[in-house]
Amino acid sequence: MKDQILARQQIQNPGFILMLTLLVPVCGAQYFVTGQHGKGVLHFFTLGGLGIWWFVSLFTLKHNIATYNQKIVEAAERLETHRK
């Protein structure tokens, strides 16, 4: 039960991350929030790939967030079954 609560706290809202991407396009916040720190640093120092990465991330954002959220849920389920 505790693992499920922690997993819910780590799940990211796609609308929130889309707002981050639109409001602060060159900092790569969408990558930092979803745990892709290397991509975030690269995105930050290249100013969003001079706008190209930013544009591409608008189209891949929903899939990336869904993948991240699915990994969080699966990890919580594994912990829950492991403890039983």
Image (tube, rainbow, N blue to C red):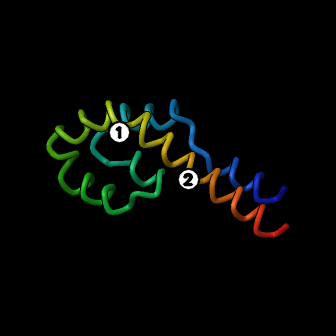
Q: Which mark is residue 24?
A: 1
Tell me the SS state at disc 2: helix
Q: Residue furthest left?
A: 50
Q: Residue furthest bottom?
A: 83
Left or right of 65? Residue 74 is right
Mark 1 surroundings within 10 Å by alpha-carbon count, few (fewer than 14), some (14 through 19), many (20 or more): few
Circle 2 residue = 71
| Residue in the picture at 57% in, 43% down | 12
* In this view, 79 is above or below 57: below
Q: Quadrant of the C terminus?
A: bottom right
| Residue in the picture at 32% in, 63% down | 38
As shown in the figure, which amino acid type bears the numbered disc 2?
Answer: Lys
Q: Position of residue 26 (x, y in %)?
A: 27, 44
Q: Position of residue 59 (x, y in %)?
A: 32, 30
Estimate the spatial distance between the alpha carbons at disc 1 and disc 2, rounded to whole Å: 26 Å
Q: Position of residue 52 (x, y in %)?
A: 17, 38
Which one is in front, 23 or 83?
83
| Residue in the picture at 63% in, 54% down | 74
Of mark 1 and mark 2, the one earlier in the sequence is 1
Mark 2 surroundings within 10 Å by alpha-carbon count, few (fewer than 14), some (14 through 19), many (20 or more): some
Left or right of 33? Residue 76 is right
Q: Position of residue 20 (x, y in %)?
A: 43, 37
Left or right of 66? Residue 40 is left
As shown in the figure, which amino acid type bears the numbered disc 1?
Answer: Val
Q: Nearer the viewer, mark 1 or mark 2?
A: 2
Quarter occupied by residue 55: top left
* In this view, 34 is above or below 23: below
Tell me the SS state at disc 1: loop
Q: Quadrant of the N terminus?
A: bottom right
Which one is in front, 42 or 68?
68
Whether residues under marks 1 and 2 lie with C-beta atoms below 8 angstroms apart, the answer is: no
| Residue in the picture at 43% in, 34% down | 62
